[in-house]
């Protein structure tokens, strides 16, 4: 499944226009992550596993200045460094992000 959210293609089991999916759908689950391996936004690593490429790769640290996080609240794209520094809040629309996402960072970013 693929939807356009704030002008960006988001692939996976998306259930609303703030990027929530069948795996993560709490109020604060409102980001999508652009996967380094296929350059496509997915709501979570489970969606990528089910609908993504067959060659998952994480963002290397030297590319943390690239925009790879999509706020489902307003469509703002954050770099990985901005995402790490934002204290789980979009710097543009101030929508809360799920701080628990950091528990899965090894699926997205080099640690």
Image (tube, helix red, strand yellow):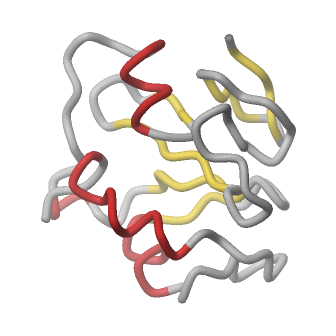
Residue at 71%, 47% (x, y): give it: 25
Count of numbered circles on the image: 0
Viewer-proximal residue, 55 or 61? 55
In the rendered structure, the answer to whether residue 82 lies left or right of residue 49 reads: right
Position in image of residue 4 (x %, y %): 80, 27
* Position of residue 44 measured from the top left corner of the image (x, y, whole percent): 49, 40
Assign the N terminus to one quadrant of the image. top right
Instruction: Indicate left or right for 45 with 27 as reference.
Output: left
- Residue lying at 84% horizontally and 60% vertically, measured from the top left: 74
Most foreground residue, 44 or 90: 44
In front of the other: 93 or 96: 96
**Side (left or right) of 107 relative to 12:** left
When the figure is inspected, residue 100 is found, relative to residue 58, above or below; the finding is below
In the rendered view, does 70 fall on the left or right side of 46? right
Q: Position of residue 75 (x, y in %)?
A: 77, 54
Residue at left 55%, top 65%?
78
Q: Quadrant of residue 7?
A: top right
Question: For the C terminus, which image quadrant?
Answer: bottom left
Does residue 38 lie above or below 29 as drawn?
A: above
Question: Where residue 69 sits: x, y (%)?
Answer: 53, 55
Residue 52 vs 97, above or below: the answer is above
Quick check: 100 above or below 37? below
Residue in view at x 19 percent, y 34 percent? 57
């Amino acid at each position: 499944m693929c939807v356009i959210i704030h002008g960006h293609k988001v692939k996976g089991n998306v259930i609303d226009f703030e990027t929530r999916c069948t795996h993560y759908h709490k109020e604060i689950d409102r980001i999508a992550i652009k996967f380094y391996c296929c350059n496509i936004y997915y709501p979570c690593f489970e969606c990528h596993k089910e609908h993504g490429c067959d060659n998952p790769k994480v963002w290397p640290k030297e590319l943390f200045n690239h925009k790879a996080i999509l706020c489902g609240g307003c469509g703002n794209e954050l770099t990985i460094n901005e995402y790490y520094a934002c204290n789980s809040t979009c710097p543009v629309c101030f929508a809360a992000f799920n701080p628990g996402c950091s528990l899965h960072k090894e699926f997205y970013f080099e640690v």
